[in-house]
Image (tube, rainbow, N blue to C red):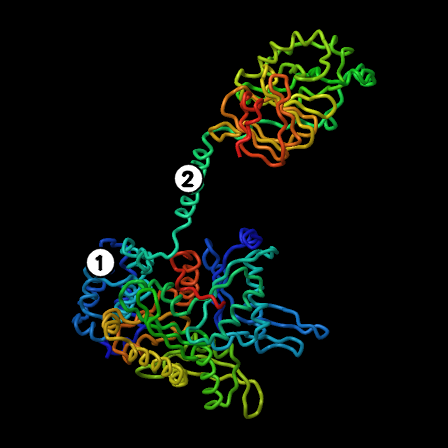
């Protein structure tokens, strides 16, 4: 049982308590030495105390000698100090307070690290997933770019219907619109404000949006307008009406060709469009003489490909529309309504095509004239 | 999304919802609230309204007129009165947030390890209906061990005995988990009841719960003094023989005698737990011993009794009353690393 009979735990007064209160004046006296001195003053054997407290003697010795690294976790060490001090008749709480002060390094509460299963994840982490998605997108983009041959997709712009275009700003225009002859519209005048330079050479497209902005513009207004725009990219596009019955001799048609060549590259791949009389439009090469002209009598879908398989021209020709075929060998014509087309070679009508859907019509002037152009 | 927004306006809380006292730990602020788990309810025209919660309500306990009820919503560590418990949690949430509305905190509540799924669900749901955004539960012995600073995650056995108001939790922990736990529904309340019964039986005097608690705190002891009567105390109550108020003097020896039954139950629970402990863990426990937490650890000489009945070193944790709240709070602060000690009843 207890080492000192009558000294049952918390309440006990006398010598040791007084010794503890006198202690703080001597800082070199640690709680360990105080406990040892108190124990020795009673002549107590550490083994017997260890037996009474059920605390291993090595822990009690570690407390006395200040070797806190030999003690178990702080909570146990504090419990041991308290029990030992109380057993010796000292104030347990004061002993614990001083022990905490002295063992401040030891007192740090440790981090709790839970055992985690070794990395065997079923699902990859979010960052890996995100990287994979990005990589896939990049791969798709590269494939798409390479498979399309690196060229820019749009090659032509369909004409903007005249009904959607804003009316010309000048009041003179409204009077000019009265004259039906003025509405032949082969002359394309620019609006007073030049449009942004959209028709840059690589696009190889003369935009009809600017050209057809004022189809009713007649000679009445032409005199008031500058014939050339300061920024050449968006110069007034003047298209001679190829194959049209009566090209009105305008003083500006002479000015037009240089500006037109400025906007269009000499390449025959340039597919241009110019408004014809009424709703009819002229497509294809409009700035150079061509040998083959295809004219639609009825609505007809046409596609022209070169022998490399690249589509040069493809659209639905309305009745009256004209397609001026670029002068280069190896072009094939696909049509949806062959009998609706008239093929003019060097100004003479070639033998009429028959049937509806025809493939592989060789656009060779000699074969067309001979009537042997249809392959299939 | 909306919940996250409200979360920014609220301080996450860890609640030690005890039978006797409720402690609230607020993230980043520590323990901010320690009040008795008592709610005073007034009936106004048939409608029940909360009159007071905590200390104020405890003063009313056993002293209420007909229209007021002072209720302890928890019994034996679990919710006995669902609605009142909800009101109490609501009150604590509001008090922590300075009555700011829109508070919708994340809450960790501790539950006895021996509680059933229904009891855990009741606690979780009452916290949810009190306005919590998310509720996690943590087992009391784990919270107590973390709060006391036991090396619970190390591969070494630690034994913790948490003696609360309603239950005593005995658990052996190792590697961040509970190896064995045993919960007996003996705690401070049972001690109070034992004191009341003893005084009634031997002195024909009826004392209230609050008086019994005061006696326990002042002269309560787990074992009899070696000689004499020990400390003495004057107690007041109602004489059962003639019905008049009376004052008697009671000694430490008598109180120790009255407490022998609940103390014996605690000792028994510890012994049973030791019997069920694997030999390797038992070897660790022999070296380092048992740590006592909870208000019951403050009962005089309880460590002495346990030491002599088990033959193991017994240490009382620092600030045993707050161990569970501190451990729950640590789980809240280090939610990521301590995630696997949290339970969610979904």
| Residue A14 vs residue A98, the one in the foreground | A98
Disc 2 or 1, which lies upstream in sequence? 1
For residue A149, above or below residue B123: above
Please tell me which residue lies in front, A296 or B294. Answer: A296
Compared to residue A107, the image places residue A358 above or below, namely: above
At label 1, counting other C-alpha atoms closer than 10 Å, the crowd grade (few under 14, some 14-19, many 20 or more) is few
Which tag is nearer the camera, tag 2 or tag 1? 2
**Distance CA(mark 2)–CA(mark 1):** 60 Å
**Which numbered disc covers residue A139?**
2
Q: At 57% from the left edge and 56% from the top edge, which residue is drawn?
A: B103
Chain letter for mark 1, please. Answer: A
Q: Quadrant of residue A147?
A: top left
The chain identifier of the residue carrying mark 2 reads: A
Query: Is A21 located above or below residue A291 in the figure?
Result: below
Res. B335 image quadrant? bottom left
Mark 2 residue element: helix
Left or right: B3 in relation to B296: right
Category of crowding for the residue at label 2, using alpha-carbon neighbours closer than 10 angstroms: few (below 14), some (14–19), many (at least 20): few
Is residue A29 left or right of A116 when viewed as pictured? left
Q: Is residue A146 left or right of residue A83?
A: right
Q: Circle 1 sits on which residue?
A: A69
Q: How many marks?
A: 2
User: At numbered mark 1, what does the secondary structure look like: helix, strand or loop?
Assistant: helix
> Could you say which is closer to the camera, residue A23 or residue A193?
A193
């Amino acid at each position: 049982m207890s080492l000192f009979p009558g000294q049952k735990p918390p309440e006990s007064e006398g010598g040791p308590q007084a010794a503890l209160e006198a202690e703080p004046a001597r800082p070199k006296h640690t709680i360990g030495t105080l406990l040892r001195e108190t124990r020795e003053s009673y002549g107590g054997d550490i083994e017997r105390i260890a037996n009474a407290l059920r605390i291993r003697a090595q822990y009690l010795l570690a407390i006395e000698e200040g070797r806190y690294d030999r003690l178990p976790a702080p909570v146990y060490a504090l419990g041991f100090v308290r029990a030992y001090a109380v057993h010796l008749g000292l104030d347990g709480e004061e002993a614990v307070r001083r022990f905490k002060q002295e063992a401040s390094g030891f007192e740090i509460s440790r981090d709790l690290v839970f055992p985690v299963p070794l990395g065997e994840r079923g699902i990859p982490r979010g960052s890996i997933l995100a990287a994979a998605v990005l990589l896939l997108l990049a791969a798709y983009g590269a494939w798409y770019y390479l498979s399309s041959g690196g060229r820019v997709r749009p090659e032509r712009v369909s004409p903007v219907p005249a009904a959607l275009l804003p009316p010309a700003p000048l009041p003179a225009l409204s009077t000019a619109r009265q004259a039906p002859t003025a509405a032949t519209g082969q002359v394309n005048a620019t609006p007073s404000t030049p449009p942004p330079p959209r028709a840059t050479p690589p696009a190889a497209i003369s935009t009809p949006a600017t050209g057809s902005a004022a189809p009713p513009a007649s000679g009445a207004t032409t005199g008031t307008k500058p014939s050339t725009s300061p920024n050449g990219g968006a110069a007034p596009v003047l298209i001679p009406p190829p194959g049209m019955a009566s090209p009105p001799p305008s003083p500006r048609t002479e000015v037009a060709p240089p500006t037109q060549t400025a906007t269009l590259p000499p390449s025959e791949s340039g597919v241009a469009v110019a408004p014809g009389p009424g709703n009819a439009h002229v497509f294809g090469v409009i700035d150079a003489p061509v040998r083959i002209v295809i004219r639609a009598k009825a609505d007809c879908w046409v596609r022209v490909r070169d022998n490399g398989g690249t589509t040069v021209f493809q659209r639905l020709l309305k009745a009256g529309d004209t397609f001026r075929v670029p002068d280069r060998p190896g072009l094939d014509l696909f049509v949806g309504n062959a009998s609706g087309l008239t093929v003019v070679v060097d100004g003479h009508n070639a033998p009429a095509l028959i049937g509806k859907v025809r493939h592989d019509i060789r656009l060779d002037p000699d074969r067309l004239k001979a009537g042997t152009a249809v392959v299939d | 999304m909306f919940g996250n927004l409200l979360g920014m306006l609220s301080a996450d809380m860890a609640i030690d919802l005890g039978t006797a006292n409720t402690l609230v730990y607020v993230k980043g602020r520590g323990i901010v609230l320690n009040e008795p788990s008592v709610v005073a309810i007034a009936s106004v025209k048939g409608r029940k309204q909360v009159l007071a919660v905590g200390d104020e309500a405890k003063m009313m306990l056993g002293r209420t007129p007909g229209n007021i009820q002072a209720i302890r919503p928890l019994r034996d560590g679990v919710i006995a009165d669902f609605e009142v418990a909800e009101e109490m949690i609501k009150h604590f949430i509001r008090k922590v947030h300075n009555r700011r509305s829109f508070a919708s905190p994340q809450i960790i509540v501790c539950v006895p390890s021996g509680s059933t799924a229904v009891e855990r669900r009741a606690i979780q749901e009452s916290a949810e209906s009190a306005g919590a955004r998310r509720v996690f539960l943590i087992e009391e012995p784990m919270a107590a061990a973390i709060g006391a600073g036991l090396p619970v995650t190390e591969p070494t056995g630690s034994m913790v005995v948490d003696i609360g108001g309603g239950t005593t939790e005995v658990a052996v922990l190792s590697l961040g988990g509970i190896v064995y736990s045993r919960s007996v529904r003996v705690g401070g309340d049972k001690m109070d009841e034992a004191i009341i019964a003893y005084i009634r039986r031997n002195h024909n005097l009826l004392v209230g719960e609050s008086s019994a608690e005061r006696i326990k705190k002042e002269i309560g002891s787990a074992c009899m003094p070696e000689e004499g009567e020990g400390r003495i105390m004057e107690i007041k109550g109602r004489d059962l023989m003639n019905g008049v108020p009376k004052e008697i003097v009671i000694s430490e020896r008598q109180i120790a005698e009255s407490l022998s039954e609940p103390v014996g139950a605690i000792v028994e629970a510890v012994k049973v737990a030791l019997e069920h402990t694997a030999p390797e863990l038992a070897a660790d426990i022999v070296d380092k011993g048992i740590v006592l937490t909870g208000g019951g650890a403050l009962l005089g000489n309880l460590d002495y009794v346990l030491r002599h009945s088990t033959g193991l070193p017994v240490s009382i944790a620092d600030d045993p009353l707050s161990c569970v709240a501190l451990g729950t709070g640590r789980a809240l602060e280090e939610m990521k690393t301590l995630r696997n000690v949290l339970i969610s009843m979904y």
